[in-house]
Amino acid sequence: MRLKNKVAVVTGAGSGIGKEIGETFLREGAKVVFSDIHDDFSEIENLEGDAKYLKCDVSSASEVIDLIEKTIDLFGGIDVIVNNAGIGSLGGILDVTDEDWQKVIDVNLSGTMYGMREAAKKMKEQNKKGSIINISSILGSVGFNGALAYSASKGGVVQLTRSGALDLAESSIRVNAIAPGFIRTNMTKDVLEDDNFNAMVKSSTPLGHVGEVEDIANAAVYLASDESKYVTGNILHVDGGWTAK
């Protein structure tokens, strides 16, 4: 088991990528706090292993502080956090609304920063050689029309990752990001069911197909484990070759 006895928090773990990461961590021996904005995640009760569910709105700094403190109360510490919680938004420079812009930035960018900051504080206090994993996107590295707020937020996550890695290196806390390409989830379901959009994605992806949630979860296991002990400040693109072009 590659994560035996590690304590991990995964935000946005109610579905999709976050849920798959949490379940994969469990199988690898971690004690996992699944966190999401929803009131109830009863499926956790049916999972094997040390799994707990805690509600958290990551756009609230106080709720993130509470999430980390409750994790430590439950499991005695924190070794890993995956800042996965995020929302999508459509709208280009001429039609993005102030409301949509602020909401996306609050969740995707500020929420990631709050998770990094509060987890790092506790890791440092406990002298943990922790791992912070942020979920960015290929749209944080390349342009994409009609997704201005989302792209800006994910580009910000890239820079949070790099700067945070430098800030925390002397504390032996590693900070990396995963940048998924188009992955089959509830968030992408509608657009991928559009024949024209689906064809565009496949033709733009050198491997020729959409990714699956386990592709991201497997990358997260590597970054959470001691196998990546010399890796920090890295943006790991799991995108079928999209950003290699």
Image: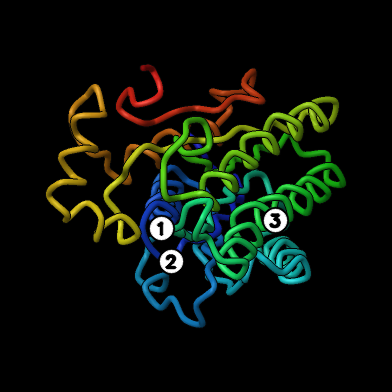
Badge 1 local density, few (<14 within 10 Å), some, or many (20+)? Answer: many
Residue 212 left/right relative to 125: left
Alpha-carbon span between mark 2 and mark 3: 20 Å
Residue corresponding to mark 3: 110
Residue at x 36% of width, y 57% of height: 16
Tell me if residue 172 comes above or below residue 61 in the rendering. Answer: above
Residue 14's mark?
2
The label on residue 19 is 1
Picture quadrant of residue 204? top left
Amino acid at pointer 3: Ser
Circle 1: residue type: Lys
Which element type, helix, strand or loop, lies under badge 3?
Answer: helix
Q: Quadrant of the C terminus?
A: top left
Visible residue check, residue 104: yes
For discs 2 and 3, the disc positioned in front in the rendered view: 3
Is 200 drawn above or below residue 232 in the view shown? below
The answer to whether mark 1 and mark 2 are in CB contact below 8 A is: yes
Q: In which quarter of the image is the N terminus?
A: top left
Would you call the spot at circle 2 few (<14 residues within 10 Å), some (14-19), or many (20 or more)? Answer: many
Mark 1 to mark 3 CA distance (whole Å): 21 Å
Question: Which mark, by number, is residue 8?
Answer: none
Q: Which of 35 and 126 is in front in this view?
A: 35
**The one of 70 and 85 positioned closer to us in this rendering:** 85
123 sits left or right of 9 in the view: right
Q: How many labels does the image show?
A: 3
Q: Front-most of 210 and 132? A: 210
Give SS at disc 2: loop
Q: Nearer the viewer, residue 41 or 152?
A: 152
